[in-house]
Structures are given as structure tokens and as C-alpha cells.
Image: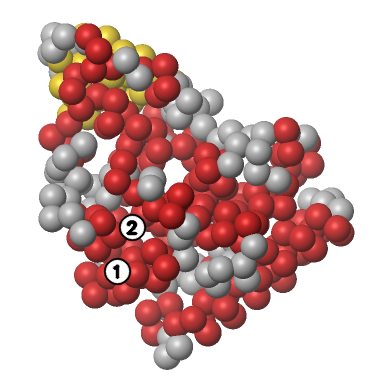
Amino acid sequence: MALCLELLVTGDLGPALDGRDDLAKLAGVTIRIADEAPAGALTRAAWQDDGFDFWAFDRHLDDLVARGEPLRVVTPVADAAAIARQIATRGQRLAPRRNRATAGAWFDRVLDEHRALHDLDKPLVRADLDHAIDAWQWSLRLDPGAPRAVQLAALLHDIERLASEPDARIEHLAADYQAFKDAHACAGARIARALLSRAGVGRTLADEACALIAVHERSGGGPAVRAINDADALSFFSLNSPGYLAYFGASQTAAKVAYTLARMSETARCELPALRMPRLVRTEALGSPHGDHRA
């Protein structure tokens, strides 16, 4: 089951939603005119509020998808397309796409093995699972033809955190942040190799994916490494940045944003203005003082 958005728009539909067909590429979107907001509907004002609770919203999306119910969003028609894209992007982990490279049962086994490692009673572990699925989806959004190794590496790039940070984050304590990240990547490659072996993934493909994971915290590299860096970075901004800011505070978040931007291609950076991010993150990333109040 996948996330479905029901847009309850106020005002004349007209040309403001001419891009409605494009919205369906991110999630199922139904559009109708709203006379009044139904109970429980998400409003534009709530979505754009600086105090919006993203964690509670994500769990609400989980519940809606499990029940097969849509998320109802009340918005003026002028903002509907932009808000729908922001919400669909945040919920893309709930409608995971594949391409021909990962369409087989072998990838089902990888996903099952990956999911089984996550204790979802632990909030940080749940956040890591969400990020893993989301980064995988970003790899496909950026390149619908993403090869198998890139998709595997995007999915498994942070798997080492299940060993080092299931209950508390420690990256901010590192004396040498890049060295910490490099060690995280190398250890993650070893864990990923064991997972891929259990899932029956062939050695050649496993070698390729794990080689990418081992260097994914370094900028530069070939196209495959850049693809993983971009997917990881965009997932940070679109999904994880609110939680990161709440956990680490403004100073560490500003440093994280700078580190993440340095790893991104210009193509990936072009995605940033359309994303829903906390005001501080948006300002650090784009230099905009307007937060997310301008859809």
C-alpha cells in the first residue's frame, strides 16, 4: 500500500493546477474543491508552521498507509502543487519505486534482510530505516535508470549506525569528523557484505555495492559515488534535517549542512528550493531568510 494525498483546494482550480498529472509521479493525488476542512485534515498553515512536528507527522503517515486511508490536505489552490510535492517527497519511502534493475525477488530478499535488522521500538533506528528507504528512492528520482549497485549502496550506506548509534548519536563527539565518517563507511561496507550474502546476492554485485558504500562519505569520485552522495544528501535535507536540528541544535546542524552541501552535485542542489525544511536548515542551505513560508 502506498501513500495517497487528497488535496482539498479552495478557490478556482483553473490553470494553477495544470501540473496535476505530474504530481502523480510522486504519489497518488486526488484533487477536489473543499467547502470546509474535514476533521483531522492537514492545513497549509500547519504544514508551514515553524513548530511543525515532523516526527509525529511521519508516524501519522505510517498509520494512514497501514489503514489504506489518504492524507487530506486543505490548501489554497495557488499553493496546492508545491505543498503536494513537498508532502509526497517526505512520504516517498511509503511508496517505494523500483526499476527493471531491482524488480526481481532477489531485491525483495535484500529488503527483508535489511528490515529485519531494525528494532523499530528505538526511535533512532526507525529514523535510520526511514532514511535508508528514502535515500534509495532519491537515487531513483535522480536517475530512473539507476543500476543495481547504486540502489543497493543507497539503501545500505548507513547500516553501520545500527551497531554504533542505535540509542544515541555520537558523530558530534568525533575529534576528526571526516575520519569518523570514513570509518563509519568502511565498517558499513563490511556489514552490508554479510547482509547481501544472506540475501543470496552474487559476489560481483556485492563487491561493487560494498566498494561504493566504503567511500560514500567522500566527495568527488565517479558517477556512482556522486549518485549515492546526492541521494544521501537530499534525504538529509528532505527527511532527516528536522530531527537532526532537534537532536543536535543549531551549531552542529549548520556544520552538518555545510558538510552535506560540499558532497552534492549542482544537479542535486537544484532540488533544494522545492523541499520543506526547517527555517534554520533552509537558511544555511540556500541563504533564504524566509524559511519554508514561501511554497
Residue 247 visible at all: no
Residue 177 horizontal/vertical position (percent): 45, 82
Quarter of the image with the C terminus in it? top left
Q: Which mark is residue 116?
A: none
Residue 240 horizontal/vertical position (percent): 38, 55
> Circle 2 — which element?
helix
Seen as rendered, the residue at the extreme front is 266
Left or right: 84 as drawn, with respect to 35: right
> Circle 1 — which element?
helix
* Residue drawn at the location 23% of the way across and 17% of the way down: 16
* Residue drawn at the location 52% of the way across and 39% of the way down: 141
* Residue drawn at the location 19% of the way across and 19% of the way down: 77
Whether residue 110 is situated above or below residue 262 in the rendered picture: above
Question: Which one is nearer the viewer's eye here, 220 or 96?
Answer: 220
Left or right: 233 as drawn, with respect to 237: right
Based on the displayed image, in which of its 4 quarters is residue 65 positioned? top left
- Residue annotated with mark 2: 241
Mark 2, Cα crowd under 10 Å, few <14 / some 14-19 / many 20+, is: many
| Sequence-first tag of 2 and 1 | 2
Mark 1, Cα crowd under 10 Å, few <14 / some 14-19 / many 20+, is: many
Left or right: 237 as drawn, with respect to 95: left
Identity, as a three-letter code, of the amino acid under mark 1: Thr
Question: Which one is nearer the viewer's eye here, 62 or 85?
Answer: 85
Residue 12 horizontal/vertical position (percent): 16, 9
Left or right: 22 as drawn, with respect to 208: left
Seen as rendered, the residue at the extreme bottom is 175
Seen as rendered, the residue at the extreme right is 203
- Residue annotated with mark 1: 253
Residue 261 visible at all: yes
Q: How many marks?
A: 2
Labels 2 & 1 near each other (Cβ < 8 A): yes
Identity, as a three-letter code, of the amino acid under mark 2: Ser
